[in-house]
Amino acid sequence: MDAPFFALSWSGGGAERAFRRRRPGVDDLPWGTLRPGDHPPVLVDRARLAWTDGAYVEYATAVQLSTIVEGLLRVRAPIDLIGMAGDFVADEMLHVELHARVVAELGGAVPYRVSEAVLHPAPAIPERPLLDLAWNMVRTCCIGETLAVPVLAATRKVANHPLVEAVFARIVEDEGPHAQLGWLFLEWAELTDEDRARLTGLARRELSSIGHTWLDPRSTVRDGVTTEGYPVAAVHGLGWLDSEAYVTTASAAAAQVVARLARFGIAV
């Protein structure tokens, strides 16, 4: 059976008002200013896919963070650690909304199938709730969100469209605490040497699975034009880093993640 298509909805009314009270200012962004006709059509089509994919990734991260909150409650983690994490799902739903509204300005989302395994994850280590939670923290916060922060910040820095810059600014503001949660958890959790060895193997595979997309720049920039012949200003304006900058930024971030994990005995 084919996987279902990714689809979003909006309730409005009381739910919208409550959401806006928790996450104000979204409607003040310069919506209605991103004009697809200002960019090469092929790049616009790619941007529609990229922003659709971004909405799905943010949605999947919300699922992962909700699982983390449940795990923190199950292992009776400190009150403040649970309280810190409890607000993060709303952050990710805001990021989903921001991506969806950007892609609407570019002409609408593209058909995109979802992974049920991602949206309905089974415990990786069901026999050990603390270790299962530790792995979710390492994968989602220590690796995923920690890598995302510098990449998103670099993308914001080069964004030359006010809406795109404002969207990335809002997302970057939220992602820092999401990353910090994982490191705070590792400081608190009482893990055995066997636990750390198991986390090392899982983290090594995770970094390997995503690292191959970073370490080989698929395009270069010469005299303001990419290898494919597109102005780099258009690439930045639609919400990307150029490939070389992406590889440089992500590789440096990955090296920092590896070093920080090592300090907790997770030597990948």
Image (cartoon, helix red, strand yellow):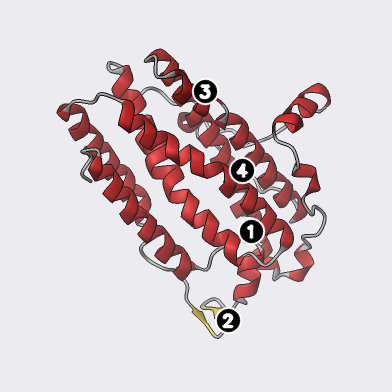
Residue 86 vertical position relative to residue 140 in the rendered view, above or below: above
What kind of residue is marked 1? Ala
Q: Position of residue 101 (x, y in %)?
A: 73, 46
What kind of residue is marked 4? Ala
Q: What numbered label is drawn on residue 224? A: 2
Q: What numbered label is drawn on residue 47? A: 1
Secondary structure found at label 3: helix
| Residue 5 seen anywhere in this rendered image of the structure | no
Farthest-out residue, left = 193
Tell me whether the residue at label 3 lies in contact with that at label 2, contact meaning CB atoms closer than 8 angstroms.
no
Report the side of 92 relative to 146 (left or right): right
Q: Earlier in the sequence, mark 1 or mark 4?
A: 1
Residue depth check, mark 1 versus mark 2: number of the one nearer the observer: 2
Q: Position of residue 81 (x, y in %)?
A: 45, 25
Q: Earlier in the sequence, mark 3 or mark 1?
A: 1
Estimate the spatial distance between the alpha carbons at disc 3 and disc 1, rounded to whole Å: 36 Å
What kind of residue is marked 2? Gly
Where is mark 4, residue-wise? 55
Q: What numbered label is drawn on residue 83? A: 3
Q: Quadrant of residue 73?
A: top left
Residue 177 vertical position relative to residue 233 in the rendered view, above or below: above
Estimate the spatial distance between the alpha carbons at disc 1 and disc 2, rounded to whole Å: 19 Å
What kind of residue is marked 3? Gly
